[in-house]
Image (cartoon, rainbow, N blue to C red):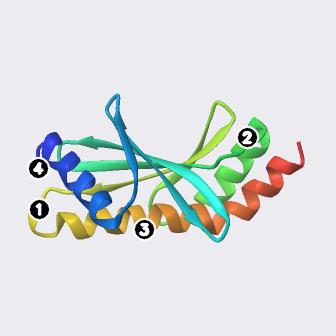
Amino acid sequence: MEQRETQGLLLSLLEDSGVPFQNEQGLVRFRFRQQGMVWETACRCQKDQVVAYGRYPFPVEKEKALGLCNQFNQQLAQGSFFEQQGQVVYRNRADLQDPYDARQRLAGCLEQNAGVIVRYWGGFSQAAQQQ
């Protein structure tokens, strides 16, 4: 799938789900909310893939963030955490070479991204409060 097709697929999925989004500077940005937690997710659409970046809304001191990223990354089968300018980000991707199941793969990628953010929220939130 070409870049414009992957982006069209993402925008269609978000619209069908009723998720408000912004499409600017090559990124599609939107917010997820679950159980009082709110965070931003940004997606970069490329040829044959969409890369999703879920970002925690609170800063974490770099050394603490890197230590937790390393610890939590060892528990993940897909995707990874990284620290960027005081923010912790979880990155994963959907491979979309086959248009037949591309929508399902993309939805699964976004669900996984949100699930990982929620699962590790407590660890990163606690580290942010100890600053």
The residue labelled by disc 2 is: 59
**Residue at the image point whose x is 45% and y is 67% from the top:** 112
* CA–CA distance in space, label 4 to label 3: 21 Å
* CA–CA distance in space, label 1 to label 2: 38 Å
The residue labelled by disc 1 is: 98
Q: Residues within 10 Å of mark 1 (few under 14, many from 20)?
A: few
Q: Is residue 7 left or right of residue 114?
A: left
Q: Residues within 10 Å of mark 3 (few under 14, many from 20)?
A: few
Question: In the rendered structure, which amino acid carries the disc numbered 1?
Answer: Asp
* CA–CA distance in space, label 1 to label 3: 19 Å
Q: How many marks?
A: 4
- Which x, y percent locates residue 83? 62, 39
Residue 111: assigned label = 3
First in sequence: mark 1 or mark 2?
A: 2
* CA–CA distance in space, label 4 to label 2: 36 Å
Question: In the rendered structure, which amino acid carries the disc numbered 2?
Answer: Pro
**Residue at the image point whose x is 40% and y is 52% from the top:** 20
First in sequence: mark 1 or mark 4?
A: 4
Residue 1: assigned label = 4
